[in-house]
Structure formats: structure tokens, C-alpha cells
Image (cartoon, rainbow, N blue to C red):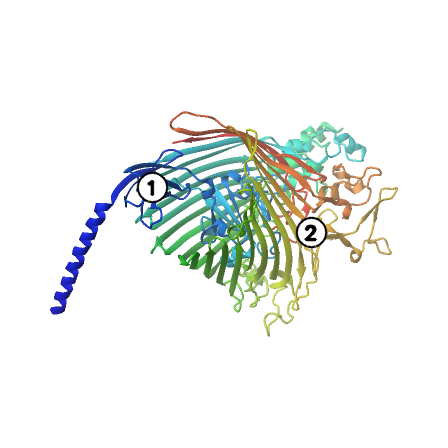
Amino acid sequence: MRNHYLTLKLLLLMIVLSAAATKEVKAQSREVTGVVTSDFDSEPLPGVSVQIKGTTRGAISDLDGSFSINVQPDDRILVFSFIGFQTKEVEIGNQSRFTVSLEESIESLQEAVVIGYGTQDKKEITSSVASVGAEQFNRGNFTNPTQLLQGKVAGLSVTRPGGNPNAAPTVRLRGISSFGATQSPLIVLDGVIGASIDAVDPNDIESFDVLKDASAAAIYGTRGAAGVILITTKRGADRKGISSVTINTFGTAEQPTRLIPILSPEQFVERGGVDYGHRTDWRDEITQTAVNGTVNASVTGGFENTSFLASVNYRNNDGIIRGTNRETLNTRFNLNHGAFNNRLRMNLSLSFNNTDVKNVNDQAVRYATVYNPTAPIYERDYSPQETPEDLEQRLSNANRDFGGYFQRPLFDFYNPVALINQQEFTNELRAAIYSYRVEYDLSNKFTIATQFSQDRFTDLATQYYSRQDFQTGFGRVGQAGQNMYDRTTTILNGTIRFEDEIFDRMNFTFLLGGETQLFNERGLNASSTRFLFDLGPNNLGAGGLRFGPGTGLGSYANTSILNSAFARANFNYANAYFVSASLRAETYSGFGRDNQTGYFPALSLGADFTQIFDMGIFSQFKPRASFGIVGQLPPSPTLALGIFGTGNRIPLDPNDPVNSVFVAPLRSASPNPQLRWETTQEFTVGLDYGLFNNKLTGQIDYYRRNISDLIFNVNVPIGTPSAVEPGGTYTASNIWANVASLTSAGFEFLATVNNVQLGGVSWTPSFNLTWYERTRISNLGGSDFNVGEIRQGVPGSPGQNDNPMIWNREGERIGDFYGPRFLGLNDAGEYRLTALDAAGELDPSQFERLGSALPTGDFGFSNTFMYGNWDLNFLLRGSWGHLIYNSYRGFYENADGASNSWNSVLTDNTPTDPLVVSTPTFSDLYLERGDFIRLDNLQLGYNVPTRAANLTNLRLYAGVQNLFTITDFTGIDPEVRWADLEDPENPNVLAPGIERRNTYFLPRIWQAGLTITFK
């Protein structure tokens, strides 16, 4: 009791003293109030920090932008700061009420760079990262978001040879990163790893952040070996009660360009071609001026502690080849909400994409170029000398067999108009992503976060060949099929972040996290032939034949899991010295049982010398160096298992072949329990620089990359001892194994001059340059497998199916052409070639390296001009150092008798005196330099002045894409081919540099549109 009495007296004394102190303070202090607004639209700003300069006392503006704070007699200045706005200082004086307006800071908005699992101030970045905001995007009609980056980032190559609106671009970051696994950078969409690029419309993207080197990508472990592209979508306004509606709509007209010159009908007949008496421009018959439209509509707003964005995007793109179309409807909803004074932050993202694709047989492009120009489209227009009975019979046969189209039983000779109209290929693409993220500040130093996301993608593809289709359907009395592919990726992660000044001027940030990624895939295919009627692809049961050529039935499903733990530490000393280190450990179920776990560390450091001593004209001079190790997932989770597929149908009872038939299992590949990660080690040194108060800014990087344990499928003899399974034997003729290493290097340069004043014109040019040290192969096959070299890329039929042009040899470069050299023509027009044996036949052992299919370098030159309300943007882009095999010349240039069924191309490189009369044979005669400079896109815009209270923006614009190309290449498109795209679903990365005869014609695109915003 006595102790409690003493305690009570002490508490009463403390209360009295506290009250007296409070009374004294109140007698000396006073309250000031005010409101903070945006200079842009005079709307109140919630969440603004109001600090008394030189103290830790402050306040936060509420939802109406209002604040109140007690000031002492010695307080002199209030400091107002808010993300995205310029900090402002205001003298207190004798005022008791303040109205403060903050100006938006474009520079501040660009300071934060998105990195793996968070953001980082740009000044602290010590690895190779490039950021591209919406104002820097390419302008034009783009069906794929990555095309916004084309020519914008040093080291990033975005290519799409030809102009098919349904073709996906090939994206490469710092060249080749594998040849058995994926080579495309990892896409991270609003934190969703590996998101479907189809799930976002280009109009909804706010920015790209490209993690180029292994130290930046290592935080993503095995999925970052080819680099990482982080996409951030647009968000709603943070201002209470503000809603705006933006509508962007434009139309385009597309016309074919760079059509390869061919013989006129008269020249064709003179050279020995059959004259059917007609004059047909086949390319004109299958092409069109494609008129297309796009509408983007979005609503953004905010209320209380909530902001939102809802958007709808519709695109309808016809191709310049008749029958080609891509129609897309994309919807997105982003919702952000803060609670408990914004200590709890919740983000919800929903997106759905519905794309319907129509394609034609891409060989129609080839036949439109080389089909007999004297042939008519329809049999009825052919008028030979014949009796009325013969005419009636001929037309009757043509109508019955070929739907009235002109067809002739010649090898590789198909009416291109009939191909387009009697074959049908469609895809129904559905992509949906939903993501929910929650962050909570445990204190001003600790933040925990978790994110759950699911990414679903479905592709339903159909193929249909009419009963009267001469190429395929006629011999099978019609053919139809469907393929379904479904993929679901589910990701759950959690992180805890600590951030503090651990001692004087040393800021420290530490991130610790774990993640689970679950992958589910399944597929189904079915096809049948022999139809009574042309019913299309949606009644496969009407096909009378379920076995044999053109038929099939199959399905599959697989599941794999990737579990990860990761950590990252960032140090910033005095805003001058920076260090970042990370480690990620991952376990993947798709590798061999002894090699499922890998560790991927990274370290980077840098120092801004301008913060250490006076650098004169330099406003930033930050050298940096980084090293990182990343892994690579296999192309399928079943490669290590040696799973069984389906073999032949076998009747067990010859007397009952129907009821006793079974399908025998067939092992698709030998198992490899030692299959392990591909591993990439990359070292980068770089410099971030700024001169003349950042009037000139840029980056310089040099990198060296070593890739080991590449995963590839190699042939092995069945029944022989296995090199990867002691005591076992090879049970199939092939095996997936780690068989090679690659080395590469490169140099990257970026320079941007900000707002050069040319009288009343403001000009911002930006130039980037990439130089590649081409990738070399080493340790091909290792000690366990006798690979030696990998020859790929045969020209094809007719007559050139056995001479691969690309030889990938150990110690040599990937993508080198090998073959004979062309020495000229003799007087008779026959080849004179090297590498001939004593009998005058080509000897492959004497073939020599003819050059590389891969580029020496790329460049991009972006320009923005501003004059009053006018703006002009254009991009010049190019590549150099790569050779391209011109397949049109390689097959259809010669005047030999066997080639007279087809029309001949007549380019600037075609020998004409004398004509080539030899059978077409590959040599360096048909290799052409692919160097080019292209005006990729140009747009002129005008912002219409408006005084309407609810109309905040009205912009009119017009532009053109692919205005001109400067090149010596005489094919369709000199664009770099990083892979052989003859089969777009399975590009062959070991056969680059081939322009196939199915290359889609290249369009020039004219555009006009407007953007309007209401508030």
C-alpha cells in the first residue's frame, strides 16, 4: 500500500508539471492554418508535407488540402513538399492564414525508377537501367506494346520484318542470350511477373523501365536471363473529386511498299514462259489499301483516399494482304486506396483482352510474286482454241474441283487468290490478369507488402481448307482442325522493407522477400479430313477420315512450380557513394532431381563525382560497375523427365482389328536427371553523365557476358550407355542436355540534349547507339555429347532442301553463313563457284565462311520539336553489319528451263548480261548487306487553344510510319532477322538472317487523329 501511495504522488506531480508546461507553450505559440493547391488546375492537394524549417515539427494537408500547425516565435519558414511537385518555402511572418500553390515537377516525376519489387531514386541506380516515359514513346499505330520502344533504348532490339499486323515483334536485349531456352526479355506488368503482353494496350502504358544487365535482373533470378522490361500502367488522379475523361481516336491507311521488281507478262513469255493469254497483276489482286480505326477511352478520378482509372481500347486492323485482320478489345481497371493516414495502401488491377485474328496462308505472298503473269484468276477467263464441248467440260471440271479458279497440275504452282479465299486461319486470343497488392507501414522504417496475381491466357486456333483448295484440301476432300492452348500463372509474394539513416549521411534500404510461382499449361488438338460439304472448322465430326495425313487427336497438361527467396541491400552515403547487393535462391521442379536449386547473386556500385568535388561543366559524372549471375528456365518443365508421347496404333488381335487396337506409348526423349540451369554471368562498367546543368545527359555502358550450360536437344544412339544416368541407357534418339557455352560483349551509348532553343523552337534530340561483339560458341557438346557443329537454315524446295546455310561451329560465331563463293558467270551464263571437287561438284568440306547474319550495331535518333502549340516528333532508326539471304533471288532469279514455270525477279543485283541459266544454288551471290536507315515514324500535332471550363485538352495530329528506307538490300525488308521465322510458332534462333519467301509485304502507314480530355 505504501508503494502505491508514493507512486500516486509522483503521477500527480507529473500531471501538474505537464499542465504548467503546456500552458506556457500555448502562451508563446500560435496556430496558423491554410490550404495547398495545384498550380496546374487550382485543385486542393491532400497529403502535402508542411514542415517548419530546421525542426521536426510538421503537419500533413487533409483531403481538402487544408492544414493547421502550431508555430513558435522563433519559427521563420514553412516548407511544403509533395511527390511530383516542386518544394516551396514560405515565410511565416505575422500571417495566420496561408494559400500555397505548388508547381508540378516533371524532373521529380522522372526521379523514381521502377526496379524489381520496388522503386529507387534515379541518382542511386548503379546498374544498367533505361527508363522511357509516355512522352518518349514512338507515335503511330502499334498492335504490340514493345513497338513503342523500337529504337529508343540502347541495347534493345525490337524487330518485325514485314508488315503482318498479327506477327509478334522479336525482342532482344543485348543480343543472343540462349539458343535452347527463351531469348525474349521477361515482361513484368505492374508487378505481375511474366505477364502476357497481350493483356495491356499501348494506350494504357505510363512508362517502361528496362533492366539491361544481370545485376539489375538478378533479383528475378531464373526468369531474368534475357533481361527484364518493367511496364507501369497509368493510374488515377490523387485529387479529391477530380474526374477526367480522355478520348483518343485515329484512323490509318496502309499501302504496300518495296515490292520486288518482276518480269512483265511480255518479258516472261519472251524468256520461255507459257502464255495463257491473260495479263494479271497478282500482287495487286491480293493487296489492298487497308483503312483502319482505333478508339481509346479512359476515365480517371479520385475521391477521399482513393484514385482510379478505367479504360476501354478498341483496335481494328486490316492488313495490306486481303483477308488479314486483327480486332482487339482491351479493358483495364486500376484502383488505389489508402487508409490509416496512408499507412495502408491497397492496389487492385484488372485487365481483360479479347483479340480475334484472321490470317491467310503466308505463301500467298510468294505465289503472288512469282505466279505466271499471263494466267487468269478464274478458269472462265482462259480462252484457248477448243470446241464448245471441251469448253463446257473444262469449266465444269474447274467449278467442281477448284471452285472455278484457274489451277494447273504443276509443281509448287498455286493460284494466290484461291489460296486466300479457300483457306481460313483464325485465332481467338483471351488474356486476363488480376492483381491485388497491399502495403502497410509498420513504422516510418518498416514496410511489409504482399501481392497476389493470376495471369490467364487462352488461344483457340482453327485451320480450314476447302474441298476445292488445290494446295491441301482437294487431295483430302477438305481438311479442318482446331488447337486450344491454355496457360495460367499464379504468383504470391511477400516482402518486408527496412529504410533508415543508420549513421550520419548513410541511408540504408534492405528488402527481404519470398515468392511462389505456379505454372499450369494444357493443350488440345483435333483435325479431320474428307468432308461432304465445306462446313468450316467448327464441325470436325463431319470429317469422314480421322486417321492418316491431315488428321490428328492429342492433348497434354503439365504443372510446374518455382519457389524463391530473395534479399537486396542498398547503401547511399551522402548522395555520392552507392552500393547495391542482392541474392535470390530458387528451386524449380522442372530440372533434374539433383539440380533443382540455384543461387543468383549480384553486386553493383557507383559514385557521383560531382557530389564529391567540383567537376566544372559536369552536373553529373557517375561511373559505375556491376556484376550479376542469372539463370534460365528450360523451354518446357518436362525435359528432364523423358516423358512418353503417343506412338502408332497397334491391333493386338489381327482377327479383331477394331476392338483390339491400342496406341503404343513412345518415349519422346531420354531422361536427364542432371539437367540444370543455364547460367549467365555478366560484368558491366558504365557512366551516367550530365553536362551544363543537365542540358546534355546520357549513359555509356560496356558489358561482357558469359553463358554456360545451355539447354539444347541433341541426338543420341538408342541403347548405348547414358552419359547422364549412370548404369542406364538412352531410351530415345534424343535428349535435352546442357551442351554449350556462349560469350558476347557490347557497347551502348545514349545522349540527350534537353530543350535546345532555336529561336521560338524548342528541340530535344536523343541519340542511342549499340555495338555488338558477336556471340561465340564454346564447349559445344562438352565431353558427354558429340555435337561438333549445328547446321541450320536450308533454303527449301524446290531443289535446295539439303544445303543448310548457317553453320554454328565451336569456337566460331553464331549465325555465320557458310557456302561457296560466286566467282562470276561464264559466257553461257553458268555459275563459276569455289569449293568444287575434281568432278566439278560442290564439296561442303571446302565451303568457307561468307559473313554473319547478325548485326554489328543498331542506332536510334529521336527528335522532338515544340513551337507554340505545335509539336513534331520523328524517329530515324537503323542497323548495320548483317547479311541477309534474299530467297526470292535465290530461287526465282535464274533463267534455266526448270524455273520458267515461275515469274522471275529482276532486282538491281540480278545478273542480266548474261542471264543465269544454272539451276539455283546457294552461294554468296544471294547474300546481300542488310544495312539500312529508316524514317520509322513521324507525327505532327497541334494543341487547340480552348477556353471551355470542362475541356482541358484538344489535340489534332497526323503522321506516317515507314516513310522511307535507305538500303542496298533488294528484298522486301532489310530488318535484322534474329531467328528464322518461316514457322512463326517455332522460330529457329540458330538460323538467323534469312528472308523467307513468305515474308509479308511492308506497309507505309498514314495516320490522322485527335485527343480530347474533359474534366
In what element is the residue under mark 2?
A: loop
Residue under numbered circle 1: 46
Rendering coords of residue 631 (x, y %): 55, 60
Contact, mark 2 vs mark 1 (Cβ under 8 Å)? no
Amino acid type of the residue that numbered disc 2 sits on in the rendered structure: Gly
Residue shown at 41%/49% (left/top)?
435
Instruction: Say which label, 2 or 1, has the lower sequence index.
Output: 1
Residue shown at 50%/45% (left/top)?
208
Which residue occupies the foreground of this view, 943 or 688? 688
Q: Is residue 735 left or right of residue 590?
A: right
Task: Tell me if residue 758 can be seen.
Answer: yes
Most distant residue in the front direction:
74
Which residue occupies the foreground of this view, 582 or 687? 687
Q: Nearer the viewer, mark 2 or mark 1?
A: 1
Rendering coords of residue 53 (x, y %): 35, 46
Task: Tell me if residue 535 can be seen.
Answer: no
Q: Quadrant of the N terminus?
A: bottom left
User: For residue 592, which quarter of the picture?
Assistant: bottom right
Residue under numbered circle 2: 793
Rendering coords of residue 613 (x, y %): 53, 52
Which residue occupies the foreground of this view, 515 or 461? 515
Amino acid type of the residue that numbered disc 1 sits on in the rendered structure: Pro
